[in-house]
Image (cartoon, coloured by chain):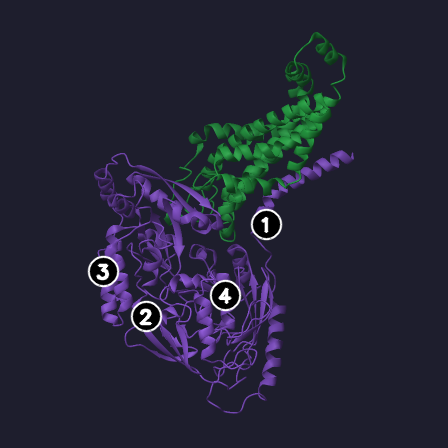
Amino acid sequence: MAASVRQTLRLVLLAGLPLLLVLAACAPIEDTADEQLEAGQATGATEGTQGTETGDGSETASATGAAGGGGSLTYAAAPPNTIDPHMMSSLGDIHTVQPVVNYLVRLGSDLSLQPDLATEWESEDGQTWTFTLREGVTFHDGSDFTAEDVVATFDRLVDPEVASAAAGSFTFLEKGGTTAVDDHTVQFDLTEPVGDFPAWVTAYQAAILPSDWEGDFATNPIGTGPFELTEYTPRLSARYERNPDYWEEGLPKLDSMEAIYYEDFGAQITAIQSGDVDLMTLLPGDLVDTVPAGGGVEVLSAPSATHGQITMRVDMEPWDDVRVRQAMALTVDREQIVEELWGGHATVANDHTLAPVYEEAEALDLDRRAQDIERAQQLLTEAGHPDGIDVELTTYGGIGIFAQAVAEMAAPAGIRIEITVEPTDVYYQHWTDLPLAMETWLHRSSIAQMPSLAFRCGADWNVPHWCNEDFDALIGELNATVDEGERAEIAAQMAAILHEEVPSVIAWFQDTLSAVRDNVSGYESHPANFVDFRTTTVE
Amino acid sequence: MIGTRLRTLLASPGVTLAVAVVLGWLAIAVIWPLLVPYGPTAQQLGGRYAPPSAEHWLGTDNLGRDVLSRILAGSRSVLIVGLASTTLGVAVGTTLGLVAGFYRGRVDELLMRSLDLLMAFPIIVIASVILAMLGPSRLNLVLVIALMLAPYNARVVRSAVLSWRDRDFVAAARLRGESGAYILFRELLPNIMGTVNVEFTMRLALSIFAVATLSFLGFGIQPPTPDWGLMVSEGRPFYQIAPWVVVAPAAAIASLVVAINVVAQRLRAS
């Protein structure tokens, strides 16, 4: 008897397991009235206490506690790998740390450079840069913000022993190259001219920390930012309180925030639809269809230079022949990818990195590379592959769908692609060795940054192993030029070389998407996927 | 003998249904190219997430592919990998079990303790670690699942052998001077074949579930190959707007695994 009960249980379990996979994707939708009520009460309480704190009327940064009452925000983010600001590398890191810190220069959501802890900056030759710092700013521990803190921050950032990912892009700044002229003036002596250096200091790792800060941001999170990090539980959540001494008057508006970490986006989407969270810091573009219109959730879109690259090893067959690479580029139906897979939240790209969001792209005048299977076949035949080629494409989790779409488009031209989709961490252990690879490149604030990371001779992340001396010379020239018009011309020449040589197929620039519930206002999507909650409020 | 066995099997309507389901999937795995209404990898980017309709009985997925066609075509990879890995695993496990049970002593100790060691790790965890190192391919999938099944099988076969090894016919064979291999495979194996058959069927269900799970985790069958586990995994983020993309392959996995288990239990009971 007992045995048969066990057998039945076993069967039920076996039948149930596959269904569990289904259920894992589908969490219950709960009534959120209670939570809203709690938020409302909290808001009322804070409003009551505010009157007493304001009233000194000073225009300086020390005006404090002027606002708040904006409610309490709960937002969904990916779990951080590290929350040491200078070591950040993933979006989860950025979305956890940025509310706590400021930068010298803020990269606005319109890609403009705005004064943050620096009020103005200047350079005559692009090599020596002077930044004037804001006065009256204090850190969360009460100490004053001075030039020494900026020096310590940038010295740590470029210190080879610290090994920040930023050091790889700040190749023109050495430890000791940053000096304090006086308490509120900092000078950067670069090893070579960098015409748009202020854009580089918006790098997300370049958060200004106090000069005496040491060690662990999880236990000692001190910045000058609008929020203080009060509690951090790795892989689960983070809690924030508004900084009552924040230097921008009337900001931030929120009283408190909580970040909740989710491993996968399906769960985040369920959470925002059920009202468990008010905001999603990142909505992957291929999932935009999964957020039904009119469900109380709004998708926020910001055009950006983030893009996918299909990289082809130019030092390996068959990609060593430029005609084969051009053939590959000609097979992609870019409009269809943008319209159908991205649901219109992307722009067609032309196999170069100068996205339309950059001001410098306005001077661009290149023929659009459209799908042309016949021409692709012709090029393959000319290159000695009349029967086509068999190749392997390696990529990782989230963008497998694009790899499959591209493979299907390339097949009629005779480019037969076999796909391997790896876990992301496995992929990035050997991505620069792969003959044919596909990955996403995030938006960079300087137009010189993408080319020098991905296409400079011998660069660490030069996945196609492409090397073009004219191109490298143009990168140097671009860096040395401060004049906007001249920069645009140089950038256009670089784009033309990439378009012609096709070390990578670049078929789209995707918008950065985030999502908010309809009770949230004052939040915008940011092209570089930065978060800025200063003006955000929750009803 | 087989006739009686078949008759006992089909005695209950539940078991008859289970046998029909298993045979049905086997048939589909062979002849799916004749059945599918669309190419299982043919994309239609303009028609993504179409709900079930007369045109697409089970709807379409995130690349506009016909889910029904992918389910039908996907039966082949899951059955090939499942059958191959189970055959290999049971063959290896049975041999080890025969050797350990017949020779006893140090050989037994050494074999069984090594297998215990292997069994101490959760199957899916160790399989995904190995596959991450070897790289995902159908052959590696077969090898890894076989490796995972063999210890359990060896243990069962060993205890079955223990009850036969001291019988007179074994002693007689020894006295005749027969080789160890002869005694193992000609004298002992035929007597425990019933156990091995039940073992094979039960392990097959496990193995099919393992294929689906490993593909779900991204260590198994690679896209765009139609595969049930992979389909569940790829469709999961879209569950809210296109549940059919996930439900259909999950139901396919469940139907096959449960049917095989029902048959296995019936075999064991008889």
Which kind of residue does numbered mark 3 sit on? Answer: Gln
Under mark 2, the amino acid is Asp
Which circle's residue, 1 or 3, is located before the other in the chain? 1
Q: Element at badge 3?
A: helix
Residue behind mark 1 = A23
Alpha-carbon distance for marks 2 and 4? 25 Å
Query: Looking at the rendered structure, which numbered label has been put on residue A493?
Result: 3
Q: Quadrant of the C terminus of chain A?
A: bottom right
- Label for residue A196? 2
Say whether residue B148 is left or right of residue A62.
Answer: right
List the residue tagged with mark 4.
A95
Residue B220 is at least partly visible in this image = no
Chain A pictured colour? purple
Of marks 1 and 3, the one in the foreground:
3
Q: Is residue B95 above or below residue A168?
A: above
Q: Does residue B116 lie above or below B268 as drawn?
A: below
Give the x, y percent position of residue B33.
Answer: 42, 31
Mark number, residue B186: none
Q: Are marks 4 and 1 on the same chain?
A: yes
Estimate the spatial distance between the alpha carbons at disc 4 and disc 1, rounded to whole Å.
29 Å
